[in-house]
């Protein structure tokens, strides 16, 4: 795998536009190759104003010198978009669905620290609904791996004999903890804080262009909002599966149990998100991601 070192995070708007323009010409197929490039961004420092905006919209406490467990995903998102909007990425960016995320935080993440960020496409796999890409992100401090994640993104298309790449979680309803009424501007506020201004999240009109009756919440906002309520102290692993879109405005029920599991359901009982938080033994890692 070749490494390309960046001097600054890529601008998201041109990447999204480039990916949209190339999408109609991409035809996913079994056995397609994926980019063999690893993007590396050294000397990364967090914009504290953007971090505070992110914390507010997701429900995290503000002012602490610590990154929320989900925030490195925001830092890595522009690098992931550069890879997935490139000519050699075989899946169309338009219509790509974020289906799951796995995060491991190995150590505390000071908001005022300096980090090295690395992102690469880890592989493609057949899925019963199309083809799924896995994007791996790693955050290092002083040479040690302090945070890592793996996100899966699904491109839907006709398949022959495709199988799901992951097991479904138990759909048993968790005890209801809180009911949240979500304003119609949640997608715009999260988009401003995260940089992810996908039109399906911003306005009813632009969402309808992609088949949604109105704007939908970002998947990473839903999991961040749950984790803000749940808490993730110390070293921890987070696993979440995005099951159905959350329409905005709307209402959801946050459920959780004592075993670390959490979920979001709609008023009709529809399951939108399942996840769990698992404590892990502390300590940074130094192997290459």
Image: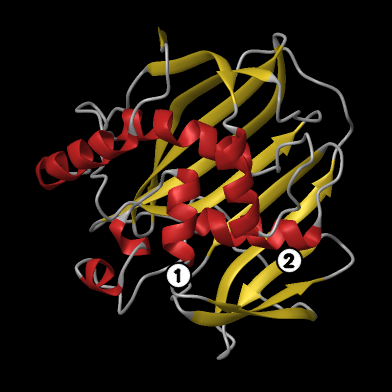
**Residue 125 x %, y %:** 40, 41
Going by the image, does 100 lie left or right of 245?
right
Q: Which mark is residue 163?
A: none
Q: Disc 2 on helix, strand or loop? A: strand
Q: Which residue is mark 1?
A: 245
**Residue 151 x %, y %:** 52, 42
Query: Residue visible at 44% across and 68% down?
Result: 185
Asked if residue 36 shows in the view, the reply is yes
Quarter of the rendering occupied by the N terminus: top left
Query: Residue visible at 63% across and 45% down?
Result: 52
Looking at this view, is 195 or 89 the one in front?
A: 195
Query: Residue visible at 41% across and 28% down?
Result: 79
Kindly check if marks 2 and 1 are in contact, taking CB atoms under 8 A apart as contact.
no
**Residue 157 x %, y %:** 24, 56
Q: Disc 1 on helix, strand or loop? A: loop
Quarter of the rendering occupied by the C terminus: top right
Looking at this view, is 217 or 277 the one in front?
A: 217
Decide which of tag 2 and tag 1 comes sooner along the chain. 1
Q: How many marks?
A: 2
Q: Which residue is mark 2?
A: 262
Going by the image, does 276 lie left or right of 199?
right
Which residue extends farthest bottom?
268
Colour mapping: secondary structure
Asked if residue 29 shows in the view, the reply is no
């Amino acid at each position: 795998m070749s490494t390309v070192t960046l001097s600054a995070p890529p601008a998201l708007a041109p990447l999204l536009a480039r990916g949209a323009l190339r999408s109609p010409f991409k035809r996913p197929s079994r056995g397609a190759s994926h980019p063999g490039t690893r993007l590396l961004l050294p000397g990364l420092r967090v914009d504290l104003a953007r971090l505070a905006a992110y914390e507010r919209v997701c429900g995290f406490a503000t002012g602490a010198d610590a990154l929320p467990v989900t925030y490195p995903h925001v830092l890595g998102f522009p690098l992931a978009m550069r890879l997935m909007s490139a000519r050699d990425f075989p899946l169309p960016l338009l219509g790509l669905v974020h289906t799951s995320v796995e995060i491991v935080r190995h150590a505390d993440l000071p908001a005022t620290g300096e980090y090295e960020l690395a992102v690469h496409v880890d592989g493609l796999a057949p899925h019963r609904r199309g083809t799924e890409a896995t994007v791996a992100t790693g955050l290092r401090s002083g040479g040690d791996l302090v945070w890592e994640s793996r996100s899966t993104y699904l491109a839907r298309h006709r398949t022959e004999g495709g199988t799901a790449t992951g097991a479904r979680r138990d759909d048993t309803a968790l005890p209801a903890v809180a009911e949240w009424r979500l304003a119609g501007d949640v997608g715009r506020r999260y988009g401003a804080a995260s940089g992810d201004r996908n039109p399906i999240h911003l306005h009813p009109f632009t969402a309808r262009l992609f088949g949604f009756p109105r704007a939908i919440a970002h998947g990473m906002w839903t999991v961040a909002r749950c984790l803000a309520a749940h808490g993730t102290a110390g070293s921890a692993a987070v696993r979440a599966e995005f099951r159905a879109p959350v329409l905005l405005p709307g209402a959801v029920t946050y459920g959780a149990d004592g075993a670390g599991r959490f979920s979001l359901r709609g008023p009709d009982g529809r399951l939108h998100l399942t996840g769990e938080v698992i404590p892990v033994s502390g300590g940074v890692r130094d192997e290459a991601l």
